[in-house]
Amino acid sequence: MQAGKPILYSYFRSSCSWRVRIALALKNIDYETIPTNLIKDGGQQLAIIEYLEETRPTPRLLPQDPKKRAYVHMISNLIVSGIQPLQNLSVLKQLRQENNLPWAQKAISSGFQALEQILQGTAGKYCVGDEVTMADLCLVPQVANAERFEVDLTPYPAISRINKTLLALEAFQVSHPCRQPDTPPELRA
Amino acid sequence: MQAGKPILYSYFRSSCSWRVRIALALKNIDYETIPTNLIKDGGQQLAIIEYLEETRPTPRLLPQDPKKRAYVHMISNLIVSGIQPLQNLSVLKQLRQENNLPWAQKAISSGFQALEQILQGTAGKYCVGDEVTMADLCLVPQVANAERFEVDLTPYPAISRINKTLLALEAFQVSHPCRQPDTPPELRA
Protein backbone atom coordinates (compact mmCIF):
# COMPACT_ATOMS: atom_id res chain seq x y z
CA MET A 1 0.00 0.00 0.00
CA GLN A 2 3.00 2.27 0.51
CA ALA A 3 3.69 2.99 -3.16
CA GLY A 4 0.92 4.75 -5.09
CA LYS A 5 -2.81 4.23 -5.18
CA PRO A 6 -3.97 0.63 -4.86
CA ILE A 7 -5.77 -0.84 -7.85
CA LEU A 8 -8.87 -2.97 -7.44
CA TYR A 9 -9.77 -5.33 -10.25
CA SER A 10 -13.49 -5.20 -9.74
CA TYR A 11 -16.72 -6.31 -11.36
CA PHE A 12 -19.69 -4.19 -10.37
CA ARG A 13 -22.06 -7.11 -9.88
CA SER A 14 -19.70 -9.52 -8.12
CA SER A 15 -20.52 -9.98 -4.44
CA CYS A 16 -16.85 -10.77 -3.84
CA SER A 17 -15.70 -7.46 -5.33
CA TRP A 18 -18.36 -5.65 -3.34
CA ARG A 19 -17.08 -7.09 -0.06
CA VAL A 20 -13.65 -5.62 -0.78
CA ARG A 21 -15.09 -2.27 -1.87
CA ILE A 22 -16.90 -1.98 1.47
CA ALA A 23 -13.66 -2.68 3.34
CA LEU A 24 -11.82 -0.05 1.33
CA ALA A 25 -14.57 2.50 1.98
CA LEU A 26 -14.68 1.75 5.72
CA LYS A 27 -10.93 2.08 6.01
CA ASN A 28 -11.05 5.23 3.93
CA ILE A 29 -8.56 3.96 1.38
CA ASP A 30 -8.52 5.76 -1.94
CA TYR A 31 -8.15 3.32 -4.85
CA GLU A 32 -8.43 2.97 -8.57
CA THR A 33 -10.93 0.57 -10.13
CA ILE A 34 -10.06 -1.53 -13.12
CA PRO A 35 -13.32 -3.10 -14.25
CA THR A 36 -12.88 -6.80 -14.82
CA ASN A 37 -15.53 -9.27 -15.73
CA LEU A 38 -14.48 -11.85 -13.19
CA ILE A 39 -14.55 -15.40 -14.38
CA LYS A 40 -13.11 -16.91 -11.24
CA ASP A 41 -15.15 -15.55 -8.42
CA GLY A 42 -15.20 -17.30 -5.10
CA GLY A 43 -13.85 -16.48 -1.73
CA GLN A 44 -10.35 -15.45 -2.68
CA GLN A 45 -11.18 -11.79 -2.18
CA LEU A 46 -11.37 -12.45 1.56
CA ALA A 47 -7.57 -12.62 1.43
CA ILE A 48 -7.58 -8.96 0.38
CA ILE A 49 -9.77 -8.04 3.32
CA GLU A 50 -7.51 -9.90 5.76
CA TYR A 51 -4.51 -8.12 4.23
CA LEU A 52 -6.18 -4.73 4.57
CA GLU A 53 -7.04 -5.54 8.16
CA GLU A 54 -3.39 -6.25 8.94
CA THR A 55 -1.87 -3.33 7.08
CA ARG A 56 -4.60 -0.75 7.79
CA PRO A 57 -6.01 -1.78 11.15
CA THR A 58 -8.32 1.22 11.67
CA PRO A 59 -11.26 0.84 11.91
CA ARG A 60 -10.96 -2.81 12.82
CA LEU A 61 -13.11 -5.29 10.92
CA LEU A 62 -12.30 -8.14 13.31
CA PRO A 63 -13.18 -7.81 17.00
CA GLN A 64 -10.36 -8.05 19.53
CA ASP A 65 -12.04 -10.78 21.56
CA PRO A 66 -11.12 -14.25 20.18
CA LYS A 67 -14.61 -15.61 20.74
CA LYS A 68 -16.20 -12.76 18.82
CA ARG A 69 -13.55 -13.09 16.11
CA ALA A 70 -14.49 -16.74 15.81
CA TYR A 71 -18.15 -15.75 15.34
CA VAL A 72 -17.10 -13.29 12.63
CA HIS A 73 -15.06 -15.94 10.84
CA MET A 74 -17.85 -18.46 11.20
CA ILE A 75 -20.42 -16.17 9.63
CA SER A 76 -18.01 -14.96 6.93
CA ASN A 77 -17.05 -18.50 6.01
CA LEU A 78 -20.63 -19.68 6.00
CA ILE A 79 -21.38 -17.08 3.34
CA VAL A 80 -18.09 -17.18 1.46
CA SER A 81 -17.72 -20.97 1.35
CA GLY A 82 -21.16 -22.29 2.15
CA ILE A 83 -23.42 -20.12 0.04
CA GLN A 84 -21.73 -17.93 -2.56
CA PRO A 85 -19.76 -20.65 -4.41
CA LEU A 86 -22.93 -22.66 -4.99
CA GLN A 87 -24.86 -19.83 -6.60
CA ASN A 88 -22.14 -18.13 -8.60
CA LEU A 89 -22.21 -17.77 -12.32
CA SER A 90 -19.66 -20.40 -13.24
CA VAL A 91 -21.61 -23.07 -11.34
CA LEU A 92 -24.96 -22.03 -12.74
CA LYS A 93 -23.50 -22.18 -16.24
CA GLN A 94 -22.79 -25.85 -15.76
CA LEU A 95 -26.41 -26.61 -14.95
CA ARG A 96 -29.25 -26.88 -17.41
CA GLN A 97 -30.89 -23.52 -17.70
CA GLU A 98 -34.20 -24.57 -16.18
CA ASN A 99 -32.38 -25.77 -13.07
CA ASN A 100 -30.56 -22.49 -12.45
CA LEU A 101 -33.05 -20.60 -10.37
CA PRO A 102 -34.17 -23.45 -8.06
CA TRP A 103 -30.54 -24.50 -7.54
CA ALA A 104 -29.44 -20.98 -6.54
CA GLN A 105 -32.51 -20.48 -4.36
CA LYS A 106 -31.90 -23.73 -2.55
CA ALA A 107 -28.22 -22.93 -1.93
CA ILE A 108 -29.09 -19.52 -0.55
CA SER A 109 -32.07 -20.47 1.56
CA SER A 110 -30.41 -23.45 3.18
CA GLY A 111 -27.43 -21.24 4.01
CA PHE A 112 -29.68 -18.46 5.30
CA GLN A 113 -31.49 -20.89 7.60
CA ALA A 114 -28.18 -21.69 9.29
CA LEU A 115 -27.15 -18.05 9.28
CA GLU A 116 -30.40 -16.81 10.81
CA GLN A 117 -29.91 -19.22 13.72
CA ILE A 118 -26.31 -18.14 14.28
CA LEU A 119 -27.32 -14.48 14.25
CA GLN A 120 -29.85 -15.10 17.04
CA GLY A 121 -26.85 -15.74 19.26
CA THR A 122 -24.32 -13.24 17.95
CA ALA A 123 -26.09 -10.18 16.58
CA GLY A 124 -26.41 -6.78 18.12
CA LYS A 125 -26.98 -3.90 15.81
CA TYR A 126 -24.87 -5.79 13.25
CA CYS A 127 -23.93 -9.45 12.68
CA VAL A 128 -21.65 -9.71 15.72
CA GLY A 129 -22.36 -7.11 18.37
CA ASP A 130 -22.59 -3.42 17.63
CA GLU A 131 -19.52 -2.88 15.46
CA VAL A 132 -19.30 -3.43 11.71
CA THR A 133 -17.16 -6.51 11.06
CA MET A 134 -16.02 -8.65 8.17
CA ALA A 135 -19.21 -10.68 8.63
CA ASP A 136 -21.27 -7.63 7.66
CA LEU A 137 -19.16 -7.12 4.53
CA CYS A 138 -20.12 -10.63 3.53
CA LEU A 139 -23.77 -10.36 4.51
CA VAL A 140 -24.94 -7.39 2.43
CA PRO A 141 -23.64 -8.58 -0.98
CA GLN A 142 -25.09 -12.04 -0.29
CA VAL A 143 -28.53 -10.62 0.54
CA ALA A 144 -28.39 -8.66 -2.72
CA ASN A 145 -27.73 -11.95 -4.54
CA ALA A 146 -30.67 -13.51 -2.70
CA GLU A 147 -32.90 -10.72 -3.93
CA ARG A 148 -31.63 -11.15 -7.48
CA PHE A 149 -32.56 -14.83 -7.29
CA GLU A 150 -35.97 -13.94 -5.83
CA VAL A 151 -35.45 -15.73 -2.52
CA ASP A 152 -38.25 -14.99 -0.06
CA LEU A 153 -36.58 -13.25 2.89
CA THR A 154 -39.57 -13.32 5.27
CA PRO A 155 -38.24 -16.35 7.20
CA TYR A 156 -35.03 -14.45 8.01
CA PRO A 157 -35.92 -11.44 10.17
CA ALA A 158 -32.43 -11.01 11.67
CA ILE A 159 -30.76 -11.14 8.27
CA SER A 160 -33.25 -8.66 6.85
CA ARG A 161 -32.98 -6.23 9.76
CA ILE A 162 -29.16 -6.21 9.83
CA ASN A 163 -28.98 -5.87 6.05
CA LYS A 164 -31.25 -2.84 6.17
CA THR A 165 -29.25 -1.20 8.95
CA LEU A 166 -26.00 -1.76 7.07
CA LEU A 167 -27.31 -0.42 3.78
CA ALA A 168 -27.89 2.92 5.49
CA LEU A 169 -24.13 3.29 6.07
CA GLU A 170 -22.14 5.29 3.57
CA ALA A 171 -19.45 2.62 3.02
CA PHE A 172 -22.11 0.19 1.87
CA GLN A 173 -23.68 2.77 -0.43
CA VAL A 174 -20.59 4.05 -2.25
CA SER A 175 -19.48 0.47 -2.83
CA HIS A 176 -22.90 -0.66 -4.12
CA PRO A 177 -23.03 -2.41 -7.52
CA CYS A 178 -25.39 0.27 -8.82
CA ARG A 179 -22.68 2.94 -8.47
CA GLN A 180 -19.54 1.43 -9.96
CA PRO A 181 -17.54 2.64 -12.98
CA ASP A 182 -18.56 -0.48 -14.90
CA THR A 183 -22.24 -0.41 -13.92
CA PRO A 184 -24.28 -0.31 -17.13
CA PRO A 185 -26.57 2.75 -17.37
CA GLU A 186 -29.78 0.74 -17.02
CA LEU A 187 -28.64 -0.58 -13.60
CA ARG A 188 -27.44 2.71 -12.17
CA ALA A 189 -29.14 4.30 -9.19
CA MET B 1 -9.94 -23.85 25.93
CA GLN B 2 -9.39 -23.08 29.62
CA ALA B 3 -11.96 -25.44 31.05
CA GLY B 4 -11.46 -29.14 30.31
CA LYS B 5 -10.57 -30.98 27.17
CA PRO B 6 -11.95 -29.52 23.94
CA ILE B 7 -14.38 -31.64 21.99
CA LEU B 8 -14.18 -31.94 18.22
CA TYR B 9 -17.32 -32.97 16.37
CA SER B 10 -15.57 -34.78 13.57
CA TYR B 11 -16.31 -37.01 10.60
CA PHE B 12 -13.36 -39.18 9.59
CA ARG B 13 -13.77 -38.59 5.86
CA SER B 14 -14.56 -34.86 5.89
CA SER B 15 -11.74 -32.73 4.53
CA CYS B 16 -13.00 -29.88 6.74
CA SER B 17 -12.69 -31.98 9.91
CA TRP B 18 -9.29 -33.16 8.81
CA ARG B 19 -8.02 -29.56 8.47
CA VAL B 20 -8.94 -28.91 12.09
CA ARG B 21 -7.43 -32.20 13.28
CA ILE B 22 -4.12 -31.23 11.68
CA ALA B 23 -4.19 -27.85 13.47
CA LEU B 24 -4.92 -29.55 16.79
CA ALA B 25 -2.06 -31.99 16.25
CA LEU B 26 0.40 -29.26 15.23
CA LYS B 27 -0.49 -27.19 18.27
CA ASN B 28 -0.28 -30.28 20.44
CA ILE B 29 -3.78 -29.84 21.83
CA ASP B 30 -5.30 -32.89 23.42
CA TYR B 31 -8.97 -33.26 22.48
CA GLU B 32 -11.90 -35.61 22.50
CA THR B 33 -13.56 -36.70 19.26
CA ILE B 34 -17.30 -37.00 18.94
CA PRO B 35 -17.90 -38.68 15.60
CA THR B 36 -20.54 -36.83 13.63
CA ASN B 37 -21.68 -37.57 10.13
CA LEU B 38 -21.53 -33.99 8.98
CA ILE B 39 -24.35 -32.85 6.77
CA LYS B 40 -23.30 -29.26 6.52
CA ASP B 41 -19.69 -29.33 5.49
CA GLY B 42 -18.11 -26.28 3.94
CA GLY B 43 -15.54 -23.86 5.13
CA GLN B 44 -16.92 -23.08 8.56
CA GLN B 45 -14.25 -25.16 10.21
CA LEU B 46 -11.71 -22.51 9.17
CA ALA B 47 -13.20 -20.40 11.97
CA ILE B 48 -12.01 -23.04 14.45
CA ILE B 49 -8.50 -22.85 13.00
CA GLU B 50 -8.45 -19.05 13.24
CA TYR B 51 -9.67 -19.32 16.84
CA LEU B 52 -6.97 -21.85 17.70
CA GLU B 53 -4.39 -19.58 16.10
CA GLU B 54 -5.45 -16.71 18.31
CA THR B 55 -5.77 -18.62 21.57
CA ARG B 56 -2.89 -21.06 21.05
CA PRO B 57 -0.41 -19.15 18.91
CA THR B 58 2.45 -21.70 19.03
CA PRO B 59 3.42 -22.96 16.52
CA ARG B 60 2.01 -20.24 14.31
CA LEU B 61 -0.07 -21.33 11.32
CA LEU B 62 -0.09 -17.84 9.81
CA PRO B 63 3.21 -16.12 8.92
CA GLN B 64 4.02 -12.82 10.61
CA ASP B 65 4.60 -10.98 7.33
CA PRO B 66 1.32 -9.51 5.97
CA LYS B 67 2.20 -10.36 2.36
CA LYS B 68 2.88 -13.98 3.23
CA ARG B 69 -0.27 -14.06 5.36
CA ALA B 70 -2.20 -12.83 2.33
CA TYR B 71 -0.74 -15.69 0.26
CA VAL B 72 -1.79 -18.15 2.96
CA HIS B 73 -5.32 -16.75 3.02
CA MET B 74 -5.48 -16.71 -0.77
CA ILE B 75 -4.52 -20.37 -1.04
CA SER B 76 -6.73 -21.41 1.87
CA ASN B 77 -9.72 -19.57 0.45
CA LEU B 78 -9.14 -20.92 -3.04
CA ILE B 79 -9.45 -24.43 -1.61
CA VAL B 80 -12.08 -23.75 1.05
CA SER B 81 -14.38 -21.60 -1.08
CA GLY B 82 -13.31 -22.28 -4.65
CA ILE B 83 -12.94 -26.04 -4.71
CA GLN B 84 -14.28 -27.92 -1.71
CA PRO B 85 -17.87 -26.59 -1.73
CA LEU B 86 -18.32 -27.64 -5.35
CA GLN B 87 -17.31 -31.23 -4.81
CA ASN B 88 -18.83 -31.93 -1.43
CA LEU B 89 -21.42 -34.54 -0.80
CA SER B 90 -24.45 -32.30 -0.44
CA VAL B 91 -23.82 -30.74 -3.86
CA LEU B 92 -23.15 -34.05 -5.58
CA LYS B 93 -26.39 -35.41 -4.13
CA GLN B 94 -28.30 -32.73 -6.01
CA LEU B 95 -26.89 -33.80 -9.36
CA ARG B 96 -27.93 -36.79 -11.37
CA GLN B 97 -25.74 -39.68 -10.44
CA GLU B 98 -24.01 -39.97 -13.82
CA ASN B 99 -22.92 -36.33 -13.57
CA ASN B 100 -21.28 -36.69 -10.16
CA LEU B 101 -17.79 -37.77 -11.08
CA PRO B 102 -17.22 -35.35 -14.02
CA TRP B 103 -18.64 -32.44 -11.99
CA ALA B 104 -16.33 -33.11 -9.05
CA GLN B 105 -13.35 -33.68 -11.33
CA LYS B 106 -13.96 -30.43 -13.16
CA ALA B 107 -14.31 -28.44 -9.93
CA ILE B 108 -11.09 -29.88 -8.57
CA SER B 109 -8.98 -29.66 -11.69
CA SER B 110 -9.97 -26.09 -12.54
CA GLY B 111 -9.14 -25.11 -8.95
CA PHE B 112 -5.87 -27.04 -9.03
CA GLN B 113 -4.83 -25.25 -12.24
CA ALA B 114 -5.12 -21.91 -10.44
CA LEU B 115 -3.48 -23.30 -7.32
CA GLU B 116 -0.52 -24.78 -9.17
CA GLN B 117 0.20 -21.36 -10.70
CA ILE B 118 -0.03 -19.60 -7.34
CA LEU B 119 2.31 -22.14 -5.76
CA GLN B 120 4.96 -21.42 -8.42
CA GLY B 121 5.26 -17.98 -6.81
CA THR B 122 4.76 -18.78 -3.13
CA ALA B 123 6.01 -22.28 -2.35
CA GLY B 124 9.17 -23.28 -0.61
CA LYS B 125 9.20 -26.61 1.10
CA TYR B 126 5.49 -26.07 1.79
CA CYS B 127 2.72 -23.96 0.22
CA VAL B 128 4.09 -20.62 1.42
CA GLY B 129 7.79 -20.72 2.24
CA ASP B 130 9.34 -23.30 4.51
CA GLU B 131 6.93 -23.26 7.44
CA VAL B 132 3.70 -25.24 7.72
CA THR B 133 0.77 -22.82 7.44
CA MET B 134 -3.00 -22.89 7.29
CA ALA B 135 -2.67 -23.27 3.51
CA ASP B 136 -1.02 -26.66 4.02
CA LEU B 137 -3.84 -27.75 6.32
CA CYS B 138 -6.21 -27.05 3.45
CA LEU B 139 -4.05 -28.62 0.74
CA VAL B 140 -3.60 -32.16 2.01
CA PRO B 141 -7.29 -32.97 2.64
CA GLN B 142 -8.17 -31.50 -0.77
CA VAL B 143 -5.57 -33.63 -2.55
CA ALA B 144 -7.02 -36.68 -0.80
CA ASN B 145 -10.43 -35.72 -2.19
CA ALA B 146 -8.89 -35.33 -5.65
CA GLU B 147 -7.50 -38.84 -5.40
CA ARG B 148 -10.88 -40.17 -4.28
CA PHE B 149 -12.43 -38.60 -7.38
CA GLU B 150 -9.67 -40.04 -9.57
CA VAL B 151 -8.32 -36.68 -10.71
CA ASP B 152 -5.06 -37.05 -12.66
CA LEU B 153 -2.44 -35.17 -10.63
CA THR B 154 0.37 -35.27 -13.22
CA PRO B 155 -0.32 -31.67 -14.40
CA TYR B 156 0.24 -30.41 -10.83
CA PRO B 157 3.85 -31.13 -9.84
CA ALA B 158 4.04 -28.47 -7.11
CA ILE B 159 0.78 -29.64 -5.50
CA SER B 160 1.95 -33.25 -5.65
CA ARG B 161 5.40 -32.55 -4.23
CA ILE B 162 4.14 -30.42 -1.32
CA ASN B 163 1.40 -32.90 -0.52
CA LYS B 164 3.93 -35.73 -0.32
CA THR B 165 6.27 -33.70 1.91
CA LEU B 166 3.39 -32.80 4.25
CA LEU B 167 2.08 -36.34 4.50
CA ALA B 168 5.42 -37.35 6.00
CA LEU B 169 4.78 -35.10 9.03
CA GLU B 170 3.29 -36.67 12.13
CA ALA B 171 0.49 -34.11 12.51
CA PHE B 172 -0.82 -35.02 9.07
CA GLN B 173 -0.61 -38.72 9.81
CA VAL B 174 -2.33 -38.86 13.20
CA SER B 175 -5.14 -36.70 11.80
CA HIS B 176 -5.57 -38.81 8.64
CA PRO B 177 -9.07 -40.13 7.85
CA CYS B 178 -7.78 -43.69 7.92
CA ARG B 179 -6.97 -43.40 11.64
CA GLN B 180 -10.00 -41.81 13.24
CA PRO B 181 -12.32 -43.27 15.91
CA ASP B 182 -15.15 -43.41 13.36
CA THR B 183 -13.09 -44.86 10.49
CA PRO B 184 -14.77 -48.09 9.40
CA PRO B 185 -12.49 -51.15 9.66
CA GLU B 186 -12.20 -51.62 5.88
CA LEU B 187 -10.74 -48.10 5.48
CA ARG B 188 -8.26 -48.27 8.35
CA ALA B 189 -4.52 -48.18 7.71
Image (cartoon, coloured by chain):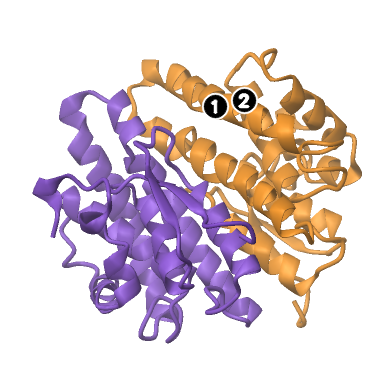
Chain colours: A purple, B orange
Residue tagged 2: B146
Q: Chain of mark 2?
A: B
Number of residue marks: 2
Residue B18, image x, y percentages = 69, 46
Of residues B123 and B180, the one nearer the viewer is: B123
Q: Amino acid at mark 1?
A: Ile
Q: Residue at x 45, y 35 (%)?
A: B86
Residue A56, image x, y percentages = 60, 71
Of residues B140 and B34, the one nearer the viewer is: B140
Secondary element at tag 1: helix
Q: Residue at x 81, y 68 (%)?
A: B57
Given contact means CB atoms under 8 Å apart, are the residues at marks 1 and 2 in contact?
A: yes
Q: Is residue B118 above or below residue B35?
A: above
Q: Hey, which residue is sitting farthest front in the picture?
A: A4
Q: Is residue B37 left or right of residue B160?
A: left
Q: Earlier in the sequence, mark 1 or mark 2?
A: 1
Of residues A53 and B179, the one nearer the viewer is: A53
Residue tagged 1: B108
Q: Amino acid at mark 2?
A: Ala
Q: Quadrant of residue B56?
A: bottom right
Q: Is residue B5 visible?
A: yes
Labels 1 and 2 positioned on one and the same chain: yes
